[in-house]
């Protein structure tokens, strides 16, 4: 009899973390590797946020806090939603966890019963389906191909809704594609969901502030008729370069927020008191640097998309947000690398690229769509120029079978 639980056997380790770890190991072994796998801003946490954390330490703010967030942080989150999204919440509609992933995991654990279905549009962030499986639910994958900009077709969505559907997960701007839903897009999806009052919506807005060329962010909780069925998740990781601080938060129905707190009380208890103090400053302090950093990301996106589309066999859409591109490598399938290995899948392409060129990217199949790969351009322009030159050289070296 195995000591490992059956529920754990249903899932796999995070592919994005695995790629990042593999790149680290190769670097430690002396290999020249450029890692484009991690979804982590290369900018440092702003100094005012660091100073708030240092002050919290010096003030002895190092004890347990309320299970699902301090009063000060919940108040800052309420103000953020009002200021930036025109959404009115009270502090008992807010939960704080150890990162956005933790909040989503808690939500699934707190609400799913065996057999409940969760619609997960693909390409998806790699953790969505596995969190659903761990919670006893069934992920229902709704494929959104490149012809539709990797976004949901509302008519197609309706075909996937059943009496067992409990949640749909929306992620805009998207990881892995960078696709963004306009207000019009959201309203079309909302028109479908309005017909099915048993379906709740988890809106993953973690990349809200990483958008380009004047794109106007809109979140589905802004649809008044749906707000009571929406759990809106966000956090400080991406916009404030605080990935390691591990603070995510969500606002939504009191019943769900209370259930999440119950889960958290028997698992992690409160997020770090120091990180919470820093997050208060992040949300309440100056926001000026956010636009400046988005401009830098846009410059990198422009370079990466142009360079990829100049490579024969690769096609890349130009995304409106996040710091990822999701190019197709279908035009390279069937070719052989210099060792004679035939590239039959995107996994073959990614592995061969790493082994032969020292560039680490993530295969599209890890995100639920075969024939693509994800590049994170949250790194320096120098690294991107070197990496794209290596990718171009690698692709030119491939021989037809």
Image (spheres, helix red, strand yellow):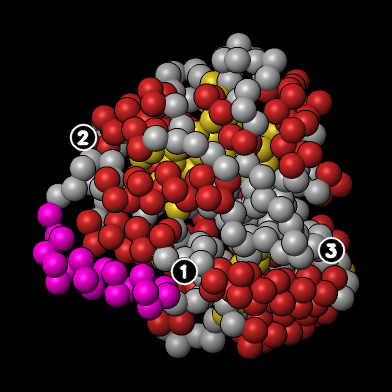
Place residue 278 in its image quadrant. Answer: bottom left
The relative height of residue 83 versus residue 356 in the rendered view (above or below) is above
Q: Is residue 52 located in the magenta-colored stretch of the structure?
A: yes
Whether residue 220 is visible here, answered yes or no, is yes
Q: Which residues are magenta?
A: 45-63
Residue 286, labelled with which disc? 1
Residue extending farthest top: 163
Specify which label sits upstream in the sequence, 1 or 3: 1
Closer to the eye: label 1 or 3:
1
Q: Quadrant of the C terminus?
A: bottom right
Marks 2 and 1, how far apart at CA? 35 Å
Find the distance from the CA under tag 1 to the CA under tag 3.
39 Å
Give the residue displayed 77% in from the left and 74% down from the top. Answer: 302
Queried whether the magenta region covers residue 240, the answer comes back as no
Q: Is residue 227 left or right of residue 56?
A: right
Q: Which numbered dot is residue 315?
A: 3
352 or 56: nearer the viewer: 56
Mark 3 surroundings within 10 Å by alpha-carbon count, few (fewer than 14), some (14 through 19), many (20 or more): some
Point out residue 64 in the picture as x, y percentages from the top left corner: 15, 50
- Of mark 2 and mark 1, the one earlier in the sequence is 2
**Between residues 155 and 397, which one lies in front from this camera angle?**
155
The image quadrant of residue 297 is bottom right
Number of residue marks: 3
Between 265 and 288, the one lying in front of the other is 288
Q: Earlier in the sequence, mark 3 or mark 2?
A: 2
Residue under circle 2? 266
Which residue sits at x=78%, y=70%?
305
For label 2, the SS is loop
- Identify which residue, 33 or 98, lies in the foreground: 98
**Image location (x, y in percent) of residue 122:** 67, 42
Q: Indicate left or right for 107 with 289 as reference.
A: left
């Amino acid at each position: 009899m195995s000591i490992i639980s059956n529920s754990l056997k249903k899932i796999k380790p995070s592919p994005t973390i695995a790629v990042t770890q593999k790149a680290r190991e190769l670097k430690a072994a002396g290999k020249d590797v450029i890692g484009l796998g991690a979804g982590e801003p290369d900018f440092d946490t702003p100094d005012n946020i660091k100073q708030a954390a240092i002050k919290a330490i010096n003030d002895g703010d190092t004890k347990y806090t309320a299970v699902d967030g301090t009063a000060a942080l919940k108040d800052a989150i309420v103000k953020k939603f009002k200021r930036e999204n025109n959404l009115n919440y009270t502090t008992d509609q807010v939960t704080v966890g150890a990162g956005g992933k933790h909040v989503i995991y808690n939500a699934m654990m707190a609400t799913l019963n065996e057999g409940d279905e969760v619609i997960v549009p693909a390409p998806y962030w790699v953790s969505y389906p596995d969190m659903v499986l761990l919670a006893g639910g069934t992920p229902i994958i709704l494929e959104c191909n490149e012809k539709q900009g990797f976004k949901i077709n509302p008519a197609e969505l309706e075909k996937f809704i059943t009496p067992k559907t409990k949640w749909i997960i929306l992620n805009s701007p998207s990881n892995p594609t960078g696709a963004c839903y306009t207000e019009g897009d959201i309203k079309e999806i909302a028109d479908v969901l309005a017909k099915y009052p048993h379906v709740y919506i988890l809106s993953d807005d973690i990349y809200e502030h990483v958008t380009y060329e004047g794109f106007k962010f809109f979140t589905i909780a802004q649809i008044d008729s749906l707000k009571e069925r929406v759990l809106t998740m966000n956090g400080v990781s991406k916009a404030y370069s605080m990935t390691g601080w591990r603070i995510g938060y969500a606002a939504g129905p009191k019943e769900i927020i209370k259930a999440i707190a119950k889960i958290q009380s028997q698992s992690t208890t409160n997020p770090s008191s120091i990180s919470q103090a820093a997050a208060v400053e992040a949300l309440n302090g100056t926001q000026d640097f956010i636009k400046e950093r988005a401009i830098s990301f846009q410059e990198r996106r422009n370079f990466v998309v142009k360079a990829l589309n100049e490579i024969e066999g690769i096609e890349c859409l130009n995304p409106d947000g996040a710091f990822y591109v999701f190019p197709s490598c279908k035009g390279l399938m069937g070719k052989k690398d210099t060792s004679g290995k035939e590239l039959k899948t995107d996994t073959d392409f990614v592995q061969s690229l790493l082994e032969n060129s020292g560039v680490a990217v993530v295969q599209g199949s890890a995100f639920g769509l075969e024939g693509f790969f994800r590049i994170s351009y949250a790194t320096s322009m120098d690294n991107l120029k070197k990496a794209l030159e290596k990718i171009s050289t690698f692709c030119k070296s491939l021989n037809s079978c």
